Image (cartoon, grey):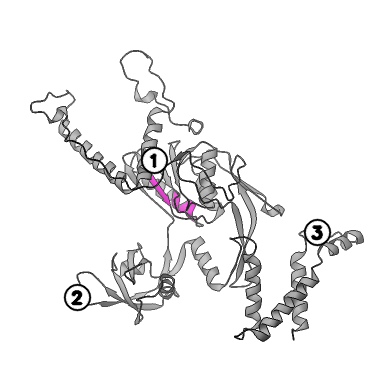
Amino acid sequence: MFNRKMLARIIGAAALSALPLMGLSQGDSNDRVSLEAESRLPLEDLRSFAKVFEQIRQGYVNEVDDSTLLEYAIKGMLQGLDPHSAYLDSRSFDDLQANTTGEFAGLGIEVGIEDDYITIITPMDGTPAERAGLRAGDVILRLAGKSLRGVSLDEAVDQMRGPVGSQVTLTIGRKGHKEPFDITLKRDKVRVYSVRGEMLEEGYGYLRISQFQMDTGGDLMRVMKKLKAEGELKGLVIDLRNNPGGVLQSSVEVVDAFLEDGLVVYTEGRNKSSNLRYAASPGDVTDGAPLVVLINDGSASAAEIVAGALQDHRRAVVMGTDSFGKGSVQTVIPINDDRAIKLTTALYFTPKGRSIQAQGIKPDITVERVQVTRVDGRARTTEADLAGHLGNGNGGEENGAEDRKRAKSDKDDWFSRDNQVFEALNVLKGLNLYVRRTPAKNEGSNAPAHKDQVARIQPEDL
């Protein structure tokens, strides 16, 4: 039969966890009695649990040990709360830590499945895979002598990870090589950066944040420094599409990078420790350049905090489609050295008090992701194409034609590759040209306004 001592331990542990988080005043017997009454557990329900537990132990088709059954019970309790509370076993706990820190011990390759084979998408910079000369498109046929054909992506990744300093041999198939060949790599600590950036065209930057790790704020400042080194920044696209979220504090740091002051986000929960407010500190890394934030239905949690805060402060135009709508905060609570629970402890709110739980952030301008095909019309002829055309007196017509051709090529590339980024770039150009334009002193004449009379964009203008 069910062990009575085990039942007592279960009841005792449950009673302890049910105690309200408040202090007990010594000598106040009424308060003590009241607290004990509040902390009583439904014994009939616990007896039912014990009966079910015993029936499984005695009658289930396969024998299951008591520890495993109790672990299943813990999982069931958390899964019944909401989609984001969960029990983290040792593997899940390790994965969570790797995701939040951006560090893991492995080979440093991004892989996918192509034609039932594990295929390398790209080797990461400065990793064992890059140093060994692995290339995008290489097929990993065997790992430590075992075939990877038909193996799931998760299984393959698990096999490639391991302790720092340990070795593993990959059998590689490469286009242009008649025979597969072996490469032995030594696992090392791999750092995955969550932020990357590039210039879309002169003056207009692109910032991609894939998830929010502990170092995302620092990664952003590093990338922004590189972008600004390329010249004046007239506008920036912040791409949060398919960003699942991550560390709350990192999302606050990202918003703080673009605000001079004001509330970023606040959280509210049952316990006072869950009621927090985060504010921006002085300093805007873009010096007030206009921003466009791209979101979609894969933008969740911390990504929605960033989009919502910049939208509420009118610091950015939010474009794309409605976000996911995960407006809850999870706290990771270790229960021993290698296991933890992830518990929903609060809801977060944008600076204007919006809870986006199960609703999401609505973009200021809706732009669906579509495949765009250019319609070619008749052959076009301009004045510059006519034989013997007059010059304009400014010189450099040929260089100007080359510049226009190159700019058109870059523009067409984004037009066909990612229409949402293309539209975001157009919005940035419009904001840069027309927001808070100061009229010329001799307004009404044909003389153009001097460029110094165009004021920088301000947050309240967006």
The x and y percentages for residue 333 are 63, 64
> Which residue is the site of mark 1?
424
* Residue 26 quadrant: bottom right
Label 1 Cα crowd, 10 Å radius (few <14 / some 14-19 / many 20+): many
Q: Which of label 3 and label 1 is nearer to you?
A: 1
Badge 2 vs badge 1, beta-carbon distance below 8 Å: no
Front in this rendered view, residue 456 or 332 = 332
Give the side of residue 389 with respect to residue 22, left or right: left
Q: Give yes or no for residue 20 being in the magenta stretch.
A: no
Type of residue at label 3? Gly
Type of residue at label 1? Ala
Front in this rendered view, residue 361 or 197 = 361
CA distance separating discs 3 and 1:
54 Å
Badge 3 vs badge 2, beta-carbon distance below 8 Å: no
> Which residue is the site of mark 2?
178
Range shown magenta? 206-220
Please name the residue shown 40% across and 41% down the image: 236
CA distance separating discs 2 and 1:
46 Å
Please name the residue shown 61% across and 49% down the image: 348
The x and y percentages for residue 17 are 74, 66
CA distance separating discs 3 and 2:
74 Å
Type of residue at label 2? Lys
> Which residue is the site of mark 3?
23
For the N terminus, the image quarter is bottom right
